Image: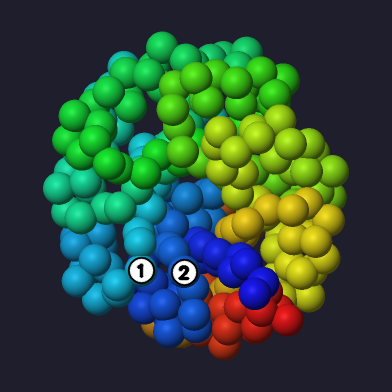
Amino acid sequence: MQEKILFEVCCGCLEDAVQAEKGGADRIELNSALFLGGLTPSIGTVEAVKARVSIPVMCMVRPREGGFCYTEYDYETMCKDAVAMICAGADGIVFGFLHEDGTVDQARTADFLRVIRAENPEIVTVFHRAIDVVPDVFAALDVLIELGVDRVLTSGQRASSVKGAETIRAMLAHAAGRIDILPGGGINAQNVKALVESTGVKSVHASARSVRKDTSVCGNDEIFFGGLIDGKGVPEDEYKVTDALLVQNVVRALEA
């Protein structure tokens, strides 16, 4: 029998999580602010998701955009957020700590693991795509393996997992079963089968989102509630939601 390839869906709210499970996802990574690469979700969101879905929920702990070298204030917040999410039922915690030079901050990672394992010794630990900007990905893997991190999310240090497939395959070989390598970035129903076959990974991570309109902000085109990029506001009359059909399409491609 063919081994099942697990599909983790990146979600940004309760509805996303419900639609991901409806489409056949095996696991959820729960965030807020996916436009910024994913930030810490609210405790209310974690509680609501855990009450509505039965598949495992990995919760992002990232207090701000703009890198992974955190201040003492950021770190204090991250520890409290992680403990609160574990108390709310999180099955795993997703995080990443780097030095200013982009190398893994081993001391802070070790301390963070101590904090969350004190709350739940069985909590799943995931180092996120901060690993995609380290100067030596194999040295970074060795650090995470030594610390006992369960999984690392990566695009193979390229813009997409498809482009980074060769590095992902090399990371998998280097890990040799000591840490799970989870490819994520640019994965969809059209390329997922080829990616799995070319890398040998046992799980994949992707968003499966479609656009929904909200015209409530269209009455005054001078007003922007978010930031400006090149003098223009990010479109505020639309947002993306997880689409159960798109999730199902990836699941079917994996089963093919």
Quick one: quadrant of the N terminus?
bottom right
Residue 129 visible (yes or no): no
Quick one: label 1, few (<14), some, or many (20+) residues within 10 Å? some
Q: Are marks 2 and 1 in contact (CB under 8 Å)?
A: yes
Horizontal and vertical percent for residue 204?
Answer: 62, 59
Quick one: quadrant of the C terminus?
bottom right
- To which residue does mark 1 refer? 55
Tag 2's secondary structure? loop
**As drawn, 256 above or below 133:** below
**As drawn, 156 above or below 15:** above
Q: Nearer the viewer, residue 194 or 161?
A: 194
Give, as a three-letter code, the residue at label 1: Ile
Tag 1's secondary structure? loop
Quick one: label 2, few (<14), some, or many (20+) residues within 10 Å? some
Residue that lies at the very extreme toward the bottom in this rendered image: 245
| Residue 26 numbered tag | 2
Q: Nearer the viewer, residue 168 or 10?
A: 168
User: Which of the 4 image quarters holds residue 188?
Assistant: bottom right
**As drawn, 255 above or below 77:** below
How many numbered tags mark residues here?
2
User: Which of the 4 image quarters holds residue 7?
Assistant: bottom right
